[in-house]
Image (cartoon, rainbow, N blue to C red):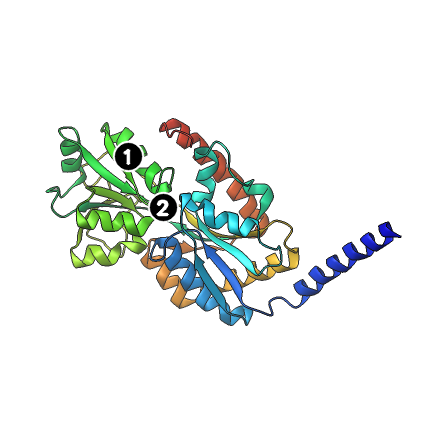
Amino acid sequence: MKKTTAIAAVLAALSGVAGAADGYPNRPIRMVVPFAAGGTASIIARSIAHEAERDLGESFVVDNRDGANGLIGTQIVVNAAPDGYTMLHVSTSIAINPGVYRKLPYDTLKDLAPVTIVALGSGYLLLANTRLGVNSVKELIALAKTKGVTYGTAGVGNSTHLVAEMFSRVAGTHLVHVPYKGVAPALNAVIGGEVNIMFIPPTAAVGHVKSGRVTALAFTGKTRWNVLPNVPTVAESGGPEFVKDAGWNAWLVPARTPKSVIERLQQAASRTVNEPKVKTVLEAGGYEPFANTPEEARAFLRSEIETYTRISREVGVKQQ
């Protein structure tokens, strides 16, 4: 009797999930962004969420939960009910963390289901405090070889950390790392002179560059960024042939989320990222709209985890 009751309960629960998927969504969706408000991922997330509300017919509640290079917010989503009402908007950090931490509190590819990659970045801006007295990569390298130069990042193992270490190795310099809890605090540290330089995805920095609060020494993309056409590439600024894209942003949900829900979210993202308002925000930040399928997103994420694990080892990042 007990066994029959248990089976009935399971079938009822499964039926409830299926029903929820059929009518999805019918209440607000919580979008967890595991970084501080004002950072690149948060700006992109809010832009896409605002437009996606029209497509889905329900509102998004963007919830910034920064800390531990995205682990805190990601864990919230991993532990959430797999019903599509709690999702994750995350940056490349989710692919970096497996190579940075000895033991994660979750298995990225088993505990989360990729929905889509919503945006691809073309490069980072290399910023300098205006009082540092350098106006090119060539001058920065020369200064770094004669005295200590500090650089801020959004945290140990963050993409802003890895790109700086990759640059340092190629340039033959030793830069002193000062980690912060997010892109915004690190940028404020450069503006205020707490650190000398920073590599940053352009979205959060372009306004400060145009206002003269920081100096943009170079762009790490293959070509100049059309929003700041006067900022040279690293090589054009007297540095080495150093090219690095600015990563990507993605949507994920808890594992075991119904396939129909995942497909509904992917379809909404696909339409939304190409809306003029969103496209403008993405392109202004050095990103381009994407939105691949869930299957393609999973393969992409797996490949990125392998790539960044290798890079972390090559630049000597100590596992935490």
Give the crowd class for mark 1: few <14, some 14-19, many >=20 residues within 10 Å. Answer: many
Please name the residue shown 39% across and 67% down the image: 277
Residue sticking out furthest to the right? 1
Give residue 13's position: percent from left, percent from top.
73, 58
Give the crowd class for mark 2: few <14, some 14-19, many >=20 residues within 10 Å. Answer: many
Q: Nearer the viewer, residue 88 or 178?
A: 178
- Please indicate whether residue 122 sits to the left or right of residue 73 in the image: left
Number of numbered tags placed on the structure image: 2
- Please indicate whether residue 35 sits to the left or right of residue 83 in the image: left
Image quarter of residue 156: top left
Q: Is residue 195 above or below residue 141?
A: below
Q: Nearer the viewer, residue 122 or 320?
A: 320
**Mark 2: which amino acid?**
Ala
Give residue 133's position: percent from left, percent from top.
10, 42
User: According to the image, label 2 marks what residue?
Assistant: 246
- Please indicate whether residue 193 sits to the left or right of residue 99 in the image: left
CA separation, marks 1 and 2? 13 Å
Please name the residue shown 17% across and 32% down the image: 148
User: According to the image, label 1 marks what residue?
Assistant: 167
